[in-house]
Image (spheres, rainbow, N blue to C red):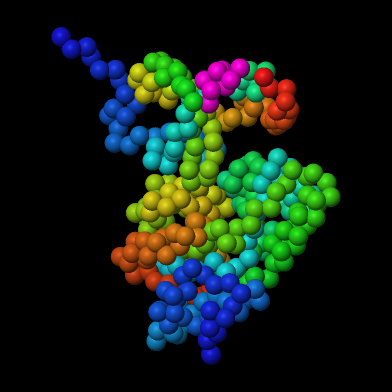
Amino acid sequence: MKPALPPRATRGRSLKLLTCPLNGSRNISEFTYGGEYHATPNHLTTSARDWAEHVFFHDNAAGVVTEWWCHTASSFWFLAERNTITDEIIRTFKAEEIYTQRVDFSTINPESRS
Amino acid sequence: MASLDPTTGMRRSQLYRRHINNKAVFKNTGYDFVVSHYDNGNDQHTELDQARSMAICDLSTLPRTGFKGAGARSWAENQGIKIPDSANRSIVQPDGCLVATLSDQELLILSDILAKSHQVTALGEQSTNDHLENDTQTYLLPRGDSHCWLAVTGNQAAEMFSKVCGVDLRPHKFALGDIAQTSVAKTNAVVIRQDLGQILSYYILCDISAAEFLWDCLLDAMQEYAGSPVGISALEALVSA
């Protein structure tokens, strides 16, 4: 017997919606997916392997994940918690919840890098 | 009235070929040339009636600018600008220009349709000077060459928009001064409700490269309401009526 399909966010609706924290509820076609959210490692102390992991690789986890999304009409980037199994959006929120202050990158001395 | 040649101005609208083909008569606002009216056998009073029911007007050569940055809001307030309390709202200033908040850190400034306001030019110069002298975290975001600016007027405008836009722009849902940054005819656009006189009206700003596409789409959508292009003289008459 086939297992029952999980409920999908779009089931029973003709339109899939996403709520932008700035602009409100909009058609999903107004948004662009921006990849998984991960805390940025300190680029001065992290290893090359960990930095490559952060930049290029994804967890691709089954379950609730945090993702970057962009409302393309306003170029507004925000975060969404989404269940990748059910495609349910749990909540969306502004990046200011995580980034409470301006991020400045100090330069590294090339000679100090081994 | 002898028409000016739009190709002799400092700047021209991306739509100027459409206007010429439609027998536009241009006039100088003091900044650049705009369509005064269309010489298609109708008098200007007819264009006023058209603007009251369903019309589109190209305002792309009128002054506009913007500011962005963590300090943009407080900097603008220090310049005596009234800023809306929340994002996606707009306020008309005492001199007639319109200030819109596109986010907590982004402002859009549009001149009045008579181009009497000098705020756009003055604020642009001031922000550059202030930024050079002190780090105000306010960055000039010129909008004159990035976006086209259209006005859609008329009591049937909201109904027409329902064909091309997913956001409910009906007047009882979308208040005066409200802003929707959304998709209009599959084109990213900023829609601002800014009634002209007593007539329901919307400003639309979209990427300047999509100006001709959006102009044609809106004209197509308003065809069933007998909508047509009007010159800025009809809008000026709406404001002063």
Asked whether, in this view, residue A60 is left or right of residue B111, the answer is: left
Across and down, in percent, residue B194 comes to 55, 58
Asked whether, in this view, residue A75 is left or right of residue B133, the answer is: left
Q: Is residue B197 visible from the viewing direction of this image?
A: yes
Image: B217 above or below B36: above
Image: B68 above or below B38: above
- What secondary structure prevails in the magenta region? helix
The answer to which quarter of the image holds residue B21 is bottom left
Asked whether, in this view, residue B155 is left or right of residue B67, the answer is: left
Between A62 and B84, which is closer to the camera in this rendering?
A62
Q: Quick one: which residue is furthest to the top in this view?
A: A1
Q: Is residue A50 magenta?
A: yes
Between A10 and B33, which is closer to the camera in this rendering?
B33
Across and down, in percent, residue B198 comes to 53, 64
Between B172 and B146, which is closer to the camera in this rendering?
B146
Residue ID at (70%, 49%): B139
Read off the magenta span.
A47-55
Residue ID at (35%, 20%): A86
Image: B224 above or below B237: above
Residue ID at (45%, 18%): A59
The answer to which quarter of the image holds residue A27 is top left
The answer to which quarter of the image holds residue A1 is top left
